[in-house]
Image: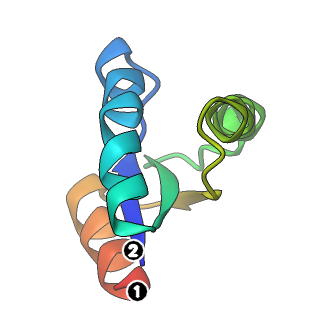
């Protein structure tokens, strides 16, 4: 099981990551950081991985990353269904 956290690199999305720590610990699940872009998003991969590494170090949780291209809400829903 994974907690899916959409990341747009805003202050609020960083806050969302921190708010998910306790839920992930309680449910013994991992975090999945997802960045969705309508133009590709690969240019943000280093930034996303840096956030994942910082989160791993801070929490000890398993943290995955995924970058997808597509319409924001449809893509988030698809990834959520894929990871159950």
Work out how far the residue at label 1 is from the one at label 2, CA to CA, in angstroms. 5 Å
Instruction: Report the side of 52 relative to 12 (left or right).
Output: right
For residue 16, what is the image quadrant? Answer: top left
Q: Which mark is residue 82?
A: 1
Q: Secondary structure at mark 2?
A: helix
Between residue 64 and residue 39, name the one nearer to us. Answer: 64
Considering depth in this image, is 47 or 64 the residue closer to the camera? 64
Image quarter hosting the N terminus? bottom left
Residue 34 point in image, percent of width and height = 48, 53
Residue matched to label 2: 79
Q: Which residue is located at x 41 percent, y 35 percent?
A: 17
15 is higher (above) or lower (below) than 6: above
Q: Position of residue 45 (x, y in %)?
A: 72, 41
Residue 2 vertical placement versus 59 (above, below): below
Q: Are marks 1 and 2 in contact (CB under 8 Å)?
A: yes
**Residue in the image at 40% along x and 29% along y:** 18
Q: Residue at the spot x=39%, y=74% of the render?
A: 79
| 55 with respect to 14 (left or right) | right
Q: Residue furthest front?
A: 26
């Amino acid at each position: 099981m994974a907690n899916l956290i959409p990341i747009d690199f805003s202050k609020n999305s960083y806050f969302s990551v921190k708010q998910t720590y306790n839920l992930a610990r309680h449910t013994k699940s991992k975090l999945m950081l997802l960045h969705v872009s309508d133009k590709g998003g690969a240019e943000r991969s280093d930034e996303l991985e840096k956030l994942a590494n910082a989160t791993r170090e801070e929490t000890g949780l398993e943290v995955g990353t995924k970058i997808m291209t597509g319409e924001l809400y449809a893509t988030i829903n698809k990834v959520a269904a894929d990871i159950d």
